[in-house]
Amino acid sequence: MDDLDVRLIDLFSNEPRIGVLEASRRLGVARGTVQARLDKLVERGVVTGWGPDLSPAALGYPVTAFLTLEIRQDVGTPDAGEDPGASGHDLVGEHLARIPEVLEVHTITGAGDLFARVVAGSNADLQRVIDRVLAHPAITRSSTVIALATQVGYRTLPLARAAAGR
């Protein structure tokens, strides 16, 4: 990452619909340079997508919660649609991936095994989402915290800027 990469990422983050030609004009570099840099950032996995960022609240899911899940590691029979060769974390991950309200899941250290961010239409609807999550036989225990407000939303731009300064 260098300064041009960061300026390019900044520009496309702030104006995702800008074209390569306009980006090259604003950055003062050749169109081919912008395209080559974008291609390289995608190839290296720095840029992982070009889709729109969606607001769960605007889609009708204003409640965000975080679930800490404890699971059994010795689960032998996968649910329908799960990989028969998988076990533990993988089976539960496959189960959770089929629930639209589950936004992300991470294997963690500490008190639990998995940490999931979920959304719901209301606090009452959150119970339905939790019930779907807990429907897998490998999940033995869970705890839930409800987010009251977002102080810092998911972001990566400051990280890209810091990486360029390394």
Image (cartoon, rainbow, N blue to C red):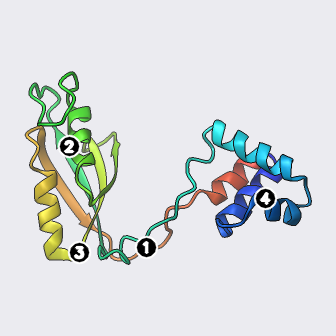
Q: Nearer the viewer, mark 2 or mark 1?
A: 2
Going by the numbered disc 3, the residue's amino acid type is Gly
- Do callouts 2 and 3 mark residues in contact (Cβ within 8 Å)? no
Q: Nearer the viewer, residue 69 or 109?
A: 69
* Kind of residue indicated by mark 4: Arg
The answer to whether residue 91 is above or below residue 144 is: above
Residue 49 versus residue 161: which sits nearer the camera?
49
Counting residues from the start of the chain, the first of labels 2 and 1 encountered is: 2
Nearer-N-terminus badge (3/4): 4
Q: Amino acid at mark 2?
A: His
Q: Residues within 10 Å of mark 4 (few under 14, many from 20)?
A: some
Going from N to C along the chain, the mark reached first, 4 or 2, is: 4
Placement of the N terminus among the 4 image quadrants: top right
Residue 161 is left or right of residue 122, and the answer is right
Find disc 3 in the rendering and name its residue.
121
At 25% across and 44% down in the image, what residue appears? 111
Task: Relative to 5, say whether 61 is above or below.
Answer: below
Q: What is the distance, in whole Å, between disc 2 and disc 3 at their CAs?
A: 21 Å
- SS assignment at label 3: loop
Q: Which mark is residue 150?
A: 1
Quadrant of residue 77 within the rendered picture: top left
Per the model, the C-alpha gap separating discs 2 and 1 is 27 Å
Q: Earlier in the sequence, mark 1 or mark 3?
A: 3
Q: Are marks 3 and 4 in contact (CB under 8 Å)?
A: no
Q: Quadrant of residue 107?
A: top left
Residue 109 pos. (x, y %): 33, 39
Residue matched to label 4: 7
Q: Residue at x 53, y 58 (%)?
A: 51
Which secondary structure lies at badge 1? loop
Residue topped by disc 2: 95
Residue at 13% x, 75% y is 124
- The residues tagged by marks 4 and 1 sit, at their Cα atoms, a distance apart of 27 Å
